[in-house]
Image: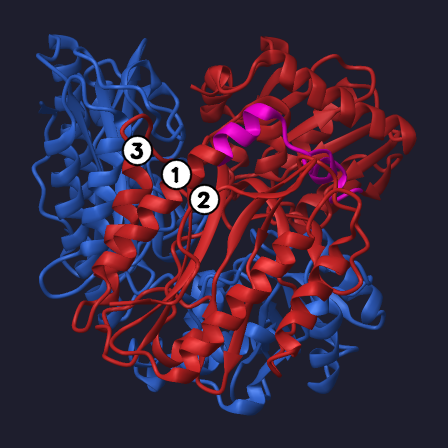
Chain colours: A blue, B red
Amino acid sequence: MSRDVFDESEYERRVKQTKERLREERLDAIVVSDPANMNYLTGYDGWSFYVHQAVIVTPENDEPVWVGREMDANGARATAWLSEPNIRSYSDDHVHSPYDLHPMDYVAKVLEDLDVEDGRIGLEMDAAYFTAKSYTRLQQNLPAADFEDRTLLVNWVRVKKSERELEYMREAARISELAMRAGLETIEEGVPEYEAAAAIYEALITGTDAFGGDYPSIVPLMPAGDHTGTPHLTWTDRSFERGDPVIIELSGCRHRYHSPLARTTFVGEPPEAIAHTAEVVVEGLEAALDAAEPGVTCESVERVWRETIAKHDMEKEDRIGYSMGLGYPPDWGEHTASIRPGDETVLEEDMTFHMIPGIWLDDYGVEISETFHVTSDGAETLAEFPRKLFTT
Amino acid sequence: MSRDVFDESEYERRVKQTKERLREERLDAIVVSDPANMNYLTGYDGWSFYVHQAVIVTPENDEPVWVGREMDANGARATAWLSEPNIRSYSDDHVHSPYDLHPMDYVAKVLEDLDVEDGRIGLEMDAAYFTAKSYTRLQQNLPAADFEDRTLLVNWVRVKKSERELEYMREAARISELAMRAGLETIEEGVPEYEAAAAIYEALITGTDAFGGDYPSIVPLMPAGDHTGTPHLTWTDRSFERGDPVIIELSGCRHRYHSPLARTTFVGEPPEAIAHTAEVVVEGLEAALDAAEPGVTCESVERVWRETIAKHDMEKEDRIGYSMGLGYPPDWGEHTASIRPGDETVLEEDMTFHMIPGIWLDDYGVEISETFHVTSDGAETLAEFPRKLFTT
């Protein structure tokens, strides 16, 4: 169970860093509702984020306080490092309630118990599961509180990974390699897309001989044919056809840590144009990876990519990468640093990114990606997988 | 692709019913952000709900308007029935933006284009992906608008299923049966939990000979041993042990429609107490299914369950079921009617529920569930799977 995933000292360090930020920003508390941030601070790991839940950190309280649904309190006892008084739960009549009860009414009570009801309280205003209603209910319950948007406060604490976190990401990379191989081996003319998805899933969860896989925060994506221009459509009953380019983007997962990987394959003999495009993507990716090292900015890494492919008269808008690691559906991205123009974040040792550049020509696209760890020497990629256009 | 999933006339009926509710409630628009509601009204189907997106319905506009990220507009063109002017997209610098841009700034512009910027606008205030920040940005952009909470307006339109929707739910039930069998066949002493999860996933996505499976909105849950009291923990590297009860809860999925199914198995020879508990659960489940028919209330169905198990001196708190069908992560529940005390929703023909009662004794629990369709005759269960305690 998650209690063994990290030593208690690692959680203590994370909480300590979070408290330092609270003090710097003169906050009396932060209400964390991003499940990845909840896990990061407490170890709590359950598929319960479809109901409202939170972790509260104050500069004074030693431990964070977990607040969730009554039936999930045992899950918190099993996976979080917290002592019993810091596991608080609301009754089931708060869930999709016809009684005008809302879980945030209970969170407000816990904030009162922590004596911060008239304090400055940070909220993750733009985190996926922190709804508009959660916010208005907190406001109604605590009219004297001063709420501040601190959506990414804990996300920025997460940005540099510990040795143990990197270990889990490397394990996830082993799984990504196996799943990518399973996908590439399955895709051929006449095979339904769902069969490739099933083979990938089976590999993602079976893992290696030494350990199993966790569910990834994003399902395997496999846009094929002219759908390579629709990056977020999922598989269908359609069969792969001769002449399809297929982009596979997937991630193994260990203890909620990811190591995403994308490759492009072609069903049949690829036309010269797509083979050339793939070579340009690899050249640009490798140039950008070479440029990544402590002290450079995210935007400068993107510039190297852009200038490299420009030599071949090609361009790609949008960002080409983002910081990531720990995550829950719907996203493994960390929402902190992005590798794109205008992002002046300076790369530091032990940051981790998914660099996923791609180039789209009229009817199809090519994407080839790597997850990398910023070391004192530069970018260490986590997966070992050939960087090229595959063919079936 | 989803364009063929339903006839356009079905979408038109859904939009018409939604507009009727808007008129009844004198709303000038509703901003729909629940991905299931977006799909229901437009057919849009993509894993893009980790960025902000919306569907806007007004009583005047013929079609809904889809608003999403630029790179997902092609996905909308491929899956939604909307005409080009009703597919609107914001540029990528709105995504996790360092430039103080937010996707809701663009949604506000679209609302202006629809001439409702000073109108009464319904919002899904408590939908998972409609964040507090989305709300405050809409308020800032449209100070003259009067926002109203209409979280479940479209969800209630969804509550009665069409013949085609029921067909997809029956297909999902076929997949649920196969996946349940795969799980039961894999679980035995010494087998790691992740291997059972992998077998279930493989079956969920491979589907039947006739069609493949979509990703379910909730991962397969398999609490085992004393973790049967922690219903939402996911699988680990632990191996099943002799004496473990294991609850398997899963759902096949077709075109985002679910048919969940739960069964309990026991590793080794079950003690008399657990075998007896399983019999009581089946008796209560069947009595409650017998009671479900058009015209009765949700709470009266729950009462039959409670009174049946009370004869055996057993009780279960919490609700025992909920309306469901279409869904995206994190939930396949519809958040409308619940089978629980106090819910006076009257059952009507073509509603669909997942009835998932369970009984917990000190150290373990037993759950046995059915998804059912309310017909003029009563409850028709969608899956055919023995209702009993399984053993390995």
Sooner in the amino-acid sequence: mark 1 or mark 3: 1
Q: Residue B179: x percent and y percent?
A: 32, 48
- In the displayed structure, A174 sits above or below A87; it is above
Between the C-alphas of marks 3 and 2, the distance is: 14 Å
Question: Residue B174 — which label?
Answer: 1
Sooner in the amino-acid sequence: mark 3 or mark 2: 3
Q: Amino acid at mark 2?
A: Ala
**A96 relative to A378 in the view: left or right:** right
Question: Residue B208 — which label?
Answer: 3
- What segment carries the magenta color? B150-169
**B147 relative to A265 in the view: left or right:** right
Secondary structure, mark 2, is: loop
Q: Chain of mark 1?
A: B
**B228 relative to B323 in the view: left or right:** left
Residue drawn at (19%, 15%) of the image: A312
Q: Quadrant of the N terminus of chain A?
A: bottom left
